[in-house]
Structures are given as C-alpha cells and as structure tokens.
Amino acid sequence: MLVLYPETVLEHDTLIARISNNNITFISAKNPYWNQNGKMFLDPDGARIVLSHLRIKK
C-alpha cells in the first residue's frame, strides 16, 4: 500500500477529480482508519493507493 499526502486542499481535490475522471473507482479499505482519513483505489497493477488529507496545511 502506498499513501500519498497532498500538501494543499487544491492538490487533494485535483487528484481526486483526475482519478474519478479516468474511470478509476475508489474502494473500501480493509483498515477502517483509511476509510476515515483518506480515499483508496487500485492502480492498474492492483496495488492499493491512498490519498490522505491528514497532512494538508491549513
């Protein structure tokens, strides 16, 4: 599993939009922590990737 931490809300929202626009489906994580603190999807090779909002500077 790879966790990505975008630095800004704009970067986070842009990544979410780009992933959604490319017909990639977000999935439910096996660990509920990531369901609350990020969004998980599978890359084309089947690796789980999480986009987390936890480190966004406010």
Image (cartoon, helix red, strand yellow):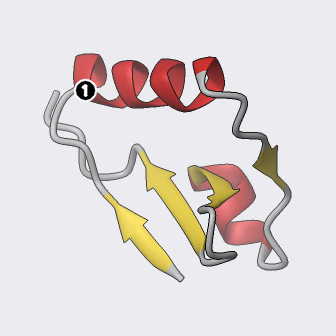
Picture residue at 51% right of the left edge, 18% below the top: 17
Q: Which residue is most to the front?
A: 44
Quadrant in the rendering for residue 2 = bottom left
Q: Amino acid at mark 1?
A: Glu
Picture residue at 39% right of the left edge, 30% below the top: 15
Where in the figure is residue 46, as x and y percent of width and height? 69, 75
Quadrant in the rendering for residue 23 = top right
* Residue 6 located left or right of residue 7: right
Q: Residues within 10 Å of mark 1 (few under 14, many from 20)?
A: some
Comparing 36 with 48, the one in front is 48
Q: Secondary structure at mark 1?
A: helix
Where in the figure is residue 10, as x and y percent of width and height? 26, 16
Picture residue at 67% right of the left edge, 55% below the top: 41
* Residue 38 located left or right of residue 10: right
Q: Count the marks: how many?
A: 1
Comparing 9 with 43, the one in front is 43
Q: Is residue 49 above or below residue 17?
A: below
* Residue 36 located left or right of residue 50: right
Q: Is residue 1 above or below residue 49?
A: below
Where in the figure is residue 1, as x and y percent of width and height? 54, 83
Q: Is residue 1 above or below residue 10?
A: below
Quadrant in the rendering for residue 25 = top right
Quadrant in which the C terminus is drawn: top left
* Residue 28 located left or right of residue 12: right
Residue, disc 1:
11
